Image (cartoon, rainbow, N blue to C red):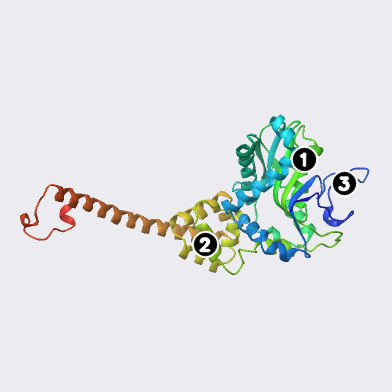
């Protein structure tokens, strides 16, 4: 069920933003927002029985679920703006939430939204992204205080890319909780020359409602994020990583590096290729420079190198077997009988010099 422009109570601390001189909120949690699902303590059980599981998988890089939700968002956006999007596609730009270098699940969702627009409606939209100046080791969903959330991201977002003057911006995000990410994104976008605040439209998968709450409870965010990927069961994430179409996101890395036991588990359980993806992703976003993760990144590096050596040995043996199979086949085709040999044929005797 689609839920549109879902708001928190007027004057709520959760809807705080930069104020104009008249006191009107300029950057707010509710600025032109729409979402697929409204989640609250009242309907949480219903959400967790179906859509919540899919959402959790999407958050951990499941390509199947990223595309599934992108398709639903495209339907919602097209219902609102389809005529203008079809007639004037150059007037519109899809904007990804900020990330450093390694795309988040929301950034992957944004990319998929653009692909689905083209596939379904033949509409090609420019896709751009906000950028982060720094990353950190914090699981943002674990922060239960508005001021803590604001302090972690204030001034951290910026835009650098194609000209956005006069464009209408479709800002895509997976969840709207405290609103601090969306407010900071509005601030960063309006600092770009020619961008009008009224031309920013926010589309979200989930709106975690706290109607009228002066002291909102953000625990639902963590519950949703870990609905299918529990903090105490790494096997589910391991299985996701074994699927080569799924992506390594910052959330995946923070899960793997959340404890040395988890890091050891993934080192032991994953083969070379998914391990190498994890190691490369950790370097891309500077996890090797973050103190809580530095030692665990080094451990993943060591495991990756060891798995590579094992893989090369296996490939060498496999190549040797293939060479000998071809040589035996050649001997058979030439009708060389076994009695021409003084002894049994060994593998080494069939390896070309």
Task: Tally the marks.
Answer: 3
Q: Residues within 10 Å of mark 2 (few under 14, many from 20)?
A: some
Mark 3 or mark 1: which comes first in sequence?
Answer: 3
Label disc, if present, on residue 238 of the rendered structure: 2
Tell me, yes or no, if residue 133 can be seen here: no
Label disc, if present, on residue 132 of the rendered structure: none
Give me the residue at 62% from left, 41% from top.
Answer: 116
Label 1 secondary element = strand
The reply, left or right, for residue 336 in relation to residue 247 is: left
Q: Residues within 10 Å of mark 1 (few under 14, many from 20)?
A: many
The furthest residue to the right: 22
The reply, left or right, for residue 232 in relation to residue 7 is: left
Nearer the viewer's eye, disc 3 or disc 2? Answer: 2
Check disc 1 and report the residue beneath it.
200
Q: As rendered, which of 28 and 245 lies closer to the eye?
A: 245
Nearer the viewer's eye, disc 3 or disc 1? Answer: 1
Label disc, if present, on residue 25 of the rendered structure: 3
Give me the residue at 11% from left, 49% from top.
Answer: 335
Mark 1 or mark 2: which comes first in sequence?
Answer: 1
Give me the residue at 69% from left, 41% from top.
Answer: 95
Mark 3 or mark 2: which comes first in sequence?
Answer: 3
**Position of residue 18 measured from the top left corner of the image (x, y, whole percent):** 84, 47
Label 1 to label 2: alpha-carbon separation: 38 Å
**Position of residue 71 measured from the top left corner of the image (x, y, whole percent):** 64, 46
């Amino acid at each position: 069920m689609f839920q549109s422009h879902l708001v928190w109570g007027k004057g709520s601390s959760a809807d705080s933003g930069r104020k104009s001189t008249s006191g009107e909120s300029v950057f707010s949690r509710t600025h032109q927002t729409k979402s697929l699902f409204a989640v609250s303590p009242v309907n949480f059980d219903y959400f967790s029985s179906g859509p919540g599981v899919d959402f959790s998988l999407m958050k951990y890089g499941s390509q199947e679920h990223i595309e599934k939700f992108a398709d639903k968002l495209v339907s919602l956006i097209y219902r609102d703006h389809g005529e203008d999007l079809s007639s004037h596609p150059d007037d519109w730009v899809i904007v990804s939430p900020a990330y450093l270098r390694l795309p988040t699940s929301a950034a992957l969702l944004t990319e998929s939204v653009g692909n689905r627009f083209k596939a379904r409606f033949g509409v090609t939209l420019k896709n751009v992204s906000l950028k982060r100046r720094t990353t950190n080791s914090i699981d943002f969903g674990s922060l239960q205080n508005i001021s803590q959330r604001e302090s972690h991201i204030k001034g951290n977002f910026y835009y650098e890319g194609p000209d956005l003057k006069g464009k209408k911006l479709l800002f895509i995000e997976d969840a709207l909780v405290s609103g601090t990410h969306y407010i900071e994104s509005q601030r960063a976008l309006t600092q770009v020359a020619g961008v009008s605040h009224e031309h920013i439209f926010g589309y979200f998968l989930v709106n975690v409602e706290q109607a009228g709450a002066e002291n909102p409870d953000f625990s639902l965010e963590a519950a949703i994020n870990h609905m299918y990927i529990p903090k105490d069961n790494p096997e589910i994430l391991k299985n996701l990583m074994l699927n080569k179409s799924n992506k390594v996101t910052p959330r995946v890395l923070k899960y793997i590096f959340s404890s040395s036991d988890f890091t050891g588990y993934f080192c032991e359980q994953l083969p070379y290729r998914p391990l190498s993806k994890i190691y490369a992703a950790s370097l891309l976003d500077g996890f090797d420079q973050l103190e809580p993760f530095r030692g665990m990144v080094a451990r993943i590096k060591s495991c990756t190198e060891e798995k590579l050596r094992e893989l090369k040995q296996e490939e060498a043996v496999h190549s040797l077997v293939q060479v000998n199979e071809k040589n035996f086949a050649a001997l058979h085709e030439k009708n060389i009988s076994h009695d021409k040999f003084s002894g049994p044929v060994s593998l080494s005797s069939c390896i070309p010099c």
